[in-house]
Amino acid sequence: MRAPPPPPPPRPARPKRPRPARSADDGDDDWSPSRCVRPAQRRSRSTVRRGAAKSKFQPPVKRTATVTSAETAPAASSTVSGDVQSQERRRVTTEEAAKEADRSPHRSPSPPYDFIGFTLEDQFKARHAVDTKAELLWNHIIAEFKDLGEEPPEREVFKRRRNTVNYREEEDLDDDDYIFCDECDREWEGDCPVHGPLEVVPDNKVPFDTGDPERDIKTRPEFLNPGRSKIPGANTGIWTEKALPARLRFGPYEGIVTADRRQATDSGYSWEIKKCRRVHHYVNAGDSSSSNWLRLVNCARFEQEQNLIAFQYKGQMYYRTYKPIVKGSELLVYYGDAYARELNINVQTFRKAPAAAPPPAAFVSGGSTVRCVHCDYACLGQERLDMHVKTRHGHIGRDGRHKCEWCEYSTNDVYNLSRHRLTHTGERPHRCDECGRTFTLLGNLTRHRRIHTGQRPYVCDVCGKAFTQHGVLTRHRRMHTGEKVRQCEQCGAVFNRLSHYTKHMQSHNGVKPHRCQVCSARFVERRKLTEHVRTHTGERPYGCSFCPARFAAQSNMRNHVTARHTHDYRHRCERCGKGFVALGKLRKHSERCTVTS
Ligand SMILES: C[S@@+](CC[C@H](N)C(=O)[O-])C[C@H]1O[C@@H](n2cnc3c(N)ncnc32)[C@H](O)[C@@H]1O
């Protein structure tokens, strides 16, 4: 039995980076690029979510304890005077340090100044941190040379600007001044000096503040597409249509910056941004018009599934590929344990083989409600579910001649493949000229057009009533035959449509699987959610064919047409003949109607 959906999840907690206690030899007390590294065990929690990949390359670790901070240098110097061996050792280490310092300007600056999202203040601080460390090193070198009674080398070898302003030095560097290098298996201050910076994949540029609800999707790089997530119930996800290498950087994650925890938590689309290990603010991507595509990346359910790592750098969240990703994969990141739990992900077994983690092929929920594991479809009865799986997911495991490049779909019919591709691209090429509504399939548009043209090709042979769709006629006929598809055991209500019965049962069970991403309101039916979302977007796709009125819901448009124009009421009072569009209204009227026939 499936538990009811969890309450709106809180923000994806930023994966925690466990910081070991400072040990004697891991301080920031000396500097060269190779020294800005943190030991491998400081790998962030988020990176752990991809397993214990061993580093292929161990970058230079601390070479010597003789290049020290300003505080420790004099002490070191005083203890070695008169000792030739120590002096020799010091000379070597000092030379090494000088070489190291000399080399350092040629390495990637730390952090790189062209890093997207850098503020001028960030750049300023970063330069000063670098300069301070060079200054400390230089002072120490001079002390070492003086100690040996020799002339120190020209300061020019450092080729660095002198530090001219008073500023807070390396203590200023926050946790998010570091970037984890998956190759080195350790963090570096800024870019990895060995493997270089991550390759920045810029978003497609889309202006802010235009209120475009599709802004998020439009910002995606061209090789990424939205599509139904492979994770049941996760709705939209992001898929790559080409193979991606490791070390790509996406982002930053865009959204509304807020310090309001509740607001951030409610949306379910917020990352915490930390400063000094405390939550400083949130980036809330709940509103698609002020966010980018990163908001659509879902949470991996188990380690093998994860292919992106989220990381904070300079106050912004980014996603990076940490391993090659095959084309046709869904991009999946790990949101952090807290959020994962909310999504019913077993954080203990996260690292186990995928077979252990995903749910069974279909499982029974709420008594006789069964759910499809491939999508968020739910219905009553296994028979109906089997039909759904056959029609919607029948391709799974099939070895058709024409294969989808983005998922496991295959078919022998090339037309089916082109139809299927639309589910990845989100393309809806067929547009209604009347109301602008778009459709993936021409057949759906043809059916839809009948709303505007009034064409009703399916006629009931008993009462002559005509319908736009064959399925609707079939259901209508049940009124004449008295056939009831289902009866609710709890309240006795009868239904001539199985889907109505399913929804009715869901309302008894309190199951509201469809949640509004903007305001978190929940709905039993997806259709109701779609209509509700239009209250946010202002969209009114249904136009009356008699007057200029437009509606967010098709049922409202139909009711309007009946009540204002055709007076072709479905329900009429048997006593006074008054017509009603809703049965409930007729019932209420009947209680009061005093007309005697
Ligand atoms: C940041 S959004 C991701 C985009 C979302 N799928 C959409 O269609 O807008 C987070 C939401 O996606 C869904 N989601 C993401 N990962 C999931 C998972 N592993 N299992 C179930 N739902 C998931 C949950 O509804 C979650 O609240």
Image (cartoon, rainbow, N blue to C red):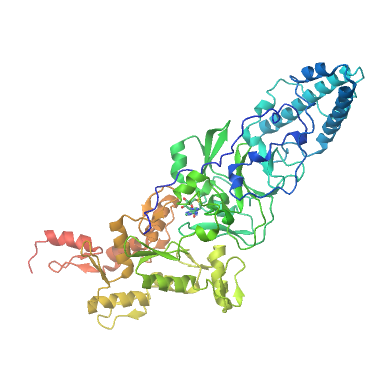
Specify whether 531 is left or right of 215.
Answer: left
Q: Can you give x and y, in whole percent of width and height, for residue 429 in the image?
A: 54, 67
Specify whether 249 is left or right of 385.
Answer: right
The answer to whether any part of residue 427 appears in the image is no
Q: Can you give x and y, in whole percent of width and height, for residue 5 in the image?
A: 39, 53
Residue placed furthest toward the right: 150
Picture quadrant of residue 581 = bottom left
Quadrant (top left/top right/bottom left/bottom right) for the C terminus: bottom left
Quadrant (top left/top right/bottom left/bottom right) for the N terminus: bottom left
Of residues 251 and 181, the one drawn nearer to the viewer in this rendering: 181
Q: Can you give x and y, in whole percent of width and height, for residue 589 in the image?
A: 16, 60
Picture quadrant of residue 596 = bottom left
Q: Is residue 54 above or below residue 359?
A: above
Residue drawn at (54%, 53%), measured in percent from left and top? 300
Of residues 90 and 413, the one drawn nearer to the viewer in this rendering: 90
The answer to whether any part of residue 182 appears in the image is yes
Q: Is residue 511 above or below residue 113?
A: below
Residue drawn at (84%, 35%), measured in percent from left and top? 103
